[in-house]
Amino acid sequence: MKNFDVTATNGYEMNIGKFISEGVDLFKKDIGGFIVATLLLFFISLIPFLGVMALGNFYKICRKVDEGQKVQAGDIFDFTDFVTYLKLFLLLFVILFIIMIPIQLSLLPILFAASASDGQLSDTGVALFAGGMGIWFLLVIVLLFVVSISMYFVQPLISLYRISSVREAFSISWKLARRNFFMIFLFTIVVGIISQLGAIVCGIGLLFTIPLGICIKYASFKNILGSSNQKTV
């Protein structure tokens, strides 16, 4: 078992500039291959669960290119981690459902009030409803960001470091993410902006910027998860 606790305890540096530089260099090694993988990723993502697994496989492709190994189009369809990703997808579904419960409950008083007044709400009721929904919406966004950052390392742990337990992967990811929570948040925003820049060029540029963004994230995983001389298998 790999000792990720060393990295979690000692900490690590979120060198965003380094990650971007290494990600760009990696992307340049096989631009055509990454574009093909991205097209296949778009196709597979029509089924959300398979899209989550395919993204994990994309990180495997990044590793192969990084290590100079031969990449095949079929690598994106690797089902080695199928069961683990199925569990992860179900966990994400449950988390999302739980996060949405407060919004669903907040609607009940409004519905009862409308029912009692023949479907009409006073201006005060409408204002309270809008204000309450706004607050809940902001809270949900915050919770989604917290969950997203806390699970930042889950996919590479599963796909690159062969962690087969979703619970273990989440536990390790949380320990690592909380060390640099806000820097990971900032890095995620930067990568998101880079990934969407291709939309400016009639959308076709996304075939270049999305895989570039994934390569940049892979560079962060490689530097952080490998900071204790841990090897991928």
Image: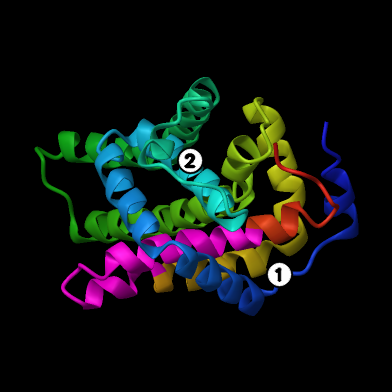
Q: Which residue is mark 2?
A: 57
Q: Quadrant of residue 177?
A: bottom right
Q: Secondary structure at mark 2?
A: helix
Find disc 1 in the rendering and name its residue: 14
The location of residue 152, given as percent across then percent down, is 60, 51
Q: Residues within 10 Å of mark 1 (few under 14, many from 20)?
A: some
The answer to which image quadrant residue 141 occupies is bottom left
Left or right for 42, reference 115 = right
> Is 159 left, or right, of 121 in this rendering?
right
Compare residues 117 and 199 and report the one nearer the observer.
199
* Cα distance between the residues tagged 2 and 1: 24 Å
Dot 2, crowdedness within 10 Å: few (<14), some or many (≥20)? many
Which residue is at a point 63% across and 48% down the rendered structure image? 153
Callout 1 amino acid: Met
Look at the image and name its color scheme.
Answer: rainbow
Q: Magenta stretch?
A: 195-220
Instruction: Identify the residue shown where x is 29% and y is 63%.
Output: 207
